[in-house]
Amino acid sequence: MLFTTLATICVALLWRVNAVLAVDFAVPSSPPTQANPVDPSLVSVSIEFFTLPGYTQIEATTNCLANLAELRGVPPAVRIGGTTQDRATYDPTLTSAVNYTVASPADAPASLTYGPPFFTLAGQLQGDVTLGLNRQLNNQAASLAAAVQAKKSMSNLFAFELGNEPEFYASNSPIIPKGQTWNQDTDAVGNMFQGAVYLSWSAGGLLSRIGTDGARFLKSISRHSYPQSACGGASTNLPSLMSHSGIVSYTRQYKAEAAATHTAGLRYFLGETNSATCGGGGISPTFGAALWIVDYVLQAALNGVDRLYFHQGTISNCVGLAFYLHLKRRSDLLVRHGNQAYCFWGSSSVFAPYYGAAFVSDFLGKDNNAKLVMLDNGTSSLAAYALYSSTTNAPLRLLVINSNYFDGTSATTPRSTATLRFTGLPASTTTQPKAKRMTAPSAVATSNVTIARSPAFNSSSCATNGVPPAILEQLQRAADGSLSVNILASEAVILLL
Ligand SMILES: *[C@@H]1O[C@H](CO)[C@@H](O)[C@H](O)[C@H]1NC(C)=O
Ligand SMILES: *[C@@H]1O[C@H](CO)[C@@H](O)[C@H](O)[C@H]1NC(C)=O
Ligand SMILES: *[C@@H]1O[C@H](CO)[C@@H](O)[C@H](O)[C@H]1NC(C)=O
Ligand SMILES: *[C@@H]1O[C@H](CO)[C@@H](O)[C@H](O)[C@H]1NC(C)=O
């Protein structure tokens, strides 16, 4: 009996060892000529218009943005806009930044006014700021006065956006000419500065309508991008959000539009993006979303996206984790509802997705002309990237993501491991390669994320001082110079060469 049991265990173990996925990736010794450098503000943030004053009062806002700036050498850009930019009217006599009333702190106001102090706060942000102005209400005098005041008080002003997602304007919106159909033809008349700001209409469609005469008034093109939707009770799916092959095929849709935008001499941004429309559908605050961010940011860059502005929620919705901890985890998918929509941080918390933003920023680093190269073929669950130095042309770092979904709920289903071997690396080098691992208890975890075995950021202030130090893993080069690393399902690792 005992023997049988032991034998069974041995067979099980052997089977499990055999089941380990082992994949080789060849690392080119220098980047292919078509490899492009990456914008230093690739990972940027979008703040819902009316919440800007609230965000500026939070310690974590300053620290979380400063950490990203420290990792990339340039601050993240900030877009201030969203649905409430089209509900806001500038009032030059208002002595507060914003004025509105809401029934509950978690609500977005149906209408608001804002005054000159709004621009003082926006002007204090460190990175490029794109400011959303109202278009839907067609109060041109107020939006023009706001633009004049913003230009006067914001040295960080990058561009204005006139209106947000005009394709969704209600048919009785003041901007829509009486008796006319609202479509991309009517919209294309007179849109300036950061153009498009579309979710579903194509930006290429705007460029062809306005021609070069119109394009010279633009600085950038913005597409809004949400891979999933939770609108109208639609269900979201975390395994599919974080799937590497899914991310590769999703981001490919932007390639032609980015190329057309660059040909027109403009920058191409995903000017508002996050996991799922209508509040994130419960998948937005998870560690799986952090892994999605890492892969999505890099795939977007490879397809010509210059920046991604990750939309942040209403601060009152960015609450602590207690709400999530009592929700039952489900293997089919996560919770259907939840109130931590899109938040990198809240008034006294740092959330799992922020770790993804920081990790990918760490990988990209401060060499602003470094070249990014994808090493895998985009069809499997394993993502592998290399980053090449702009000075030596040699690979500096590798990044791997195991996008296999581990939900952590089953005591009997072990977390699978993949072994990735990188070949083509120089056999003789004086540096000792190391691994920096981002992990969490599972893809559905909303807390307990670590980078290099450290919580990395103060969990309330987002500061890095006082946090336990990073512990890097030592890696051994094989005689032929190749490097191997093990990576669990739902994990990411940076290899420092
Ligand atoms: C602020 O808005 C409220 C309505 O929400 C209005 O009653 C009040 O007069 C406004 N205050 C100022 C100073 O404009
Ligand atoms: C893509 O890579 C995976 C993993 O390395 C491999 O199994 C698969 O055969 C490759 N597919 C193609 C089309 O090369
Ligand atoms: C997270 O860490 C805390 C403190 O170390 C621990 O009590 C808790 O069980 C952990 N949660 C998970 C989901 O692992
Ligand atoms: C985190 O920051 C808070 C507020 O700034 C501070 O009180 C706390 O001591 C910090 N925790 C650690 C571990 O440094």
Image (spheres, rainbow, N blue to C red):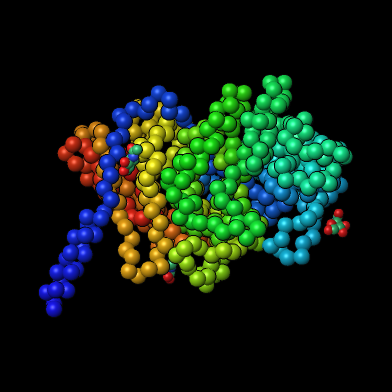
Q: Is residue 210 visible?
A: yes
Which residue is nearer to you in this view: 397 or 60?
A: 397
Point out residue 129 in the picture as x, y percentages from the top left corner: 65, 39
Residue depicted at x 27% and y 41%: 24
Q: Is residue 59 visible?
A: no
Point out residue 173 in the picture as x, y percentages from the top left corner: 82, 45
In the rendered image, which quarter contains the N terminus? bottom left
Residue depicted at x 40% and y 40%: 378
Point out residue 230 in the picture as x, y percentages from the top left corner: 60, 56
Residue 145 falls left or right of residue 460: right
The correct choice, above or below, for 395 with respect to 297 in the image is above
Residue 447 falls left or right of residue 431: right
Residue 217: quarter of image: top right
Residue 429 falls left or right of residue 31: left
Residue depicted at x 59% and y 64%: 337
Point out residue 166 in the picture as x, y percentages from the top left corner: 73, 41
Q: Point out the residue furthest to the bottom here.
A: 1
In the rendered image, which quarter contains the C terminus? top left
Residue 108: quarter of image: bottom right
